[in-house]
Image (cartoon, grey):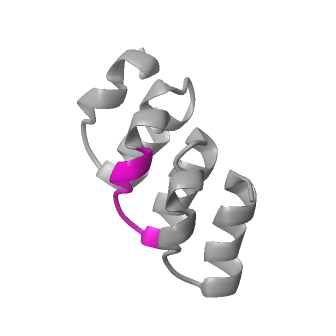
Amino acid sequence: MNAKDAYDHAKNVIKGQFPEGEPIIATSPKYAYLYALDVIKGRFPEGEAMIAKDHFYPYWYAKNIIQGRWTEGESSIA
């Protein structure tokens, strides 16, 4: 199972958190962000390190999930 499959399983099959798939989801900035947004509807600490390294998703994570400043992602946003 890859990050997309684990995210899709959580969102469309379980329709909720998928603890067994979270380590896989956390390997992808895109799916870690989407999991936080669509499934958890809040912070996903296990995926934050990967999200923070990306060039695109830290901004959206700060805006839509944190709803404020997120220092961990600022260097990637800059």
Position of residue 45 measured from the top left corner of the image (x, y, whole percent): 33, 51
Q: Residue furthest bottom?
A: 14
Identify which residue is drawn at 46% across, 60% down. Answer: 36
Magenta stretch holds residue 20: no
Magenta stretch holds residue 44: yes
Q: Tell me the quarter of the picture where residue 25 sits.
A: bottom right
- Of 1 and 3, nearer the camera is 1
Identify which residue is drawn at 70% across, 80% down. Answer: 12
Identify which residue is drawn at 41% across, 52% down. Answer: 64
Say how many tags the image has. Answer: 0
Magenta stretch in the rendered image: 39-47
Above/below status of 52 relative to 43: above
Left or right of 65, for residue 54: right
Give the quarter of the figure containing the C terminus: top left
Position of residue 20 measured from the top left corner of the image (x, y, whole percent): 53, 69
Position of residue 55 measured from the top left corner of the image (x, y, whole percent): 55, 23
Above/below status of 16 relative to 71: below
Q: Tell me the quarter of the picture where residue 48 sits.
A: top left
- Of 35 and 2, nearer the camera is 2
Give the quarter of the figure containing the N terminus: bottom right
Left or right of 70, for residue 10: right
